Image (tube, rainbow, N blue to C red):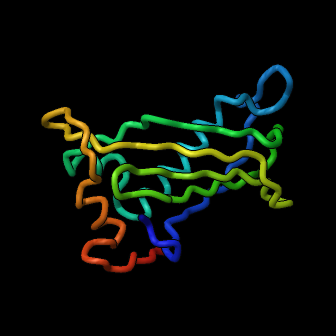
Amino acid sequence: MPQASLDFSFEITLSAAFHDLDPMNVVWHGNYVRYFEQARCALLARYHYDYPAMRDSGYAWPVVDMRVKYVGPLTYGQSFIVRATIVEWENRLKIEYVVRDAASGRRLTKGYTIQVAVDMASGEMQYVCPPVLLACLGLQDGAQPERQA
């Protein structure tokens, strides 16, 4: 079980673009998947295990489960923060997301994604996360994570 004292989080700031709006002039619900992806990529890059590094390590990490809970709308030009946090890493990679209004800090959306490691050579799902993920998170041999600016 992950230790509560570890914080594997990263935040990005985005702005709702006109092309993201639906006919009701709010961000279309499907765009939140893209916002989660952008935050996930930035978080994984922080630990030097972004998608090219995953591929180079011999593992694909498909998203196998996702949940999104919409609390409040995003509107055109609204600046917002997406915080991505790794909360599980032993048997799967679970990342939680919180979308907040940049000005007020009010929570607008939350969700999570679950990814599993798949050995690219055999195509077989791994039931334990490969050591390369633990190494990138600084967790091998009980080591504390390396913090990066």
Q: Residue furthest left?
A: 121
Q: Nearer the viewer, residue 52 or 60?
A: 60
What x and y, as percent, mark residue 19? 71, 28
What x and y, as percent, mark residue 119? 20, 41
Which residue is rendered at x = 78% and y = 47% of the image? 108
- Tell whether 71 sits left or right of 3: right
Which residue is rendered at x = 47% and y = 50% of the image? 94
Q: Residue furthest top?
A: 23
Q: Examine the image and state in which quarter residue 132 appears.
A: bottom left
- Above-or-below relation of 71 to 101: above
- Above-or-below relation of 134 to 39: below
What x and y, as percent, mark residue 101? 79, 53
What x and y, as percent, mark residue 80? 74, 52
Which residue is rendered at x = 37% and y = 52% of the image? 50
- Above-or-below relation of 100 to 124: below
- Tell whether 10 sits left or right of 22: left
- Tell whether 91 sits left or right of 104: left
- Give the quarter of the figure containing the N terminus: bottom left
Which residue is rendered at x = 35% and y = 62% of the image? 48
- Tell whether 37 sits left or right of 2: right
The number of discs equals 0
Q: Nearer the viewer, residue 100 or 140?
A: 140
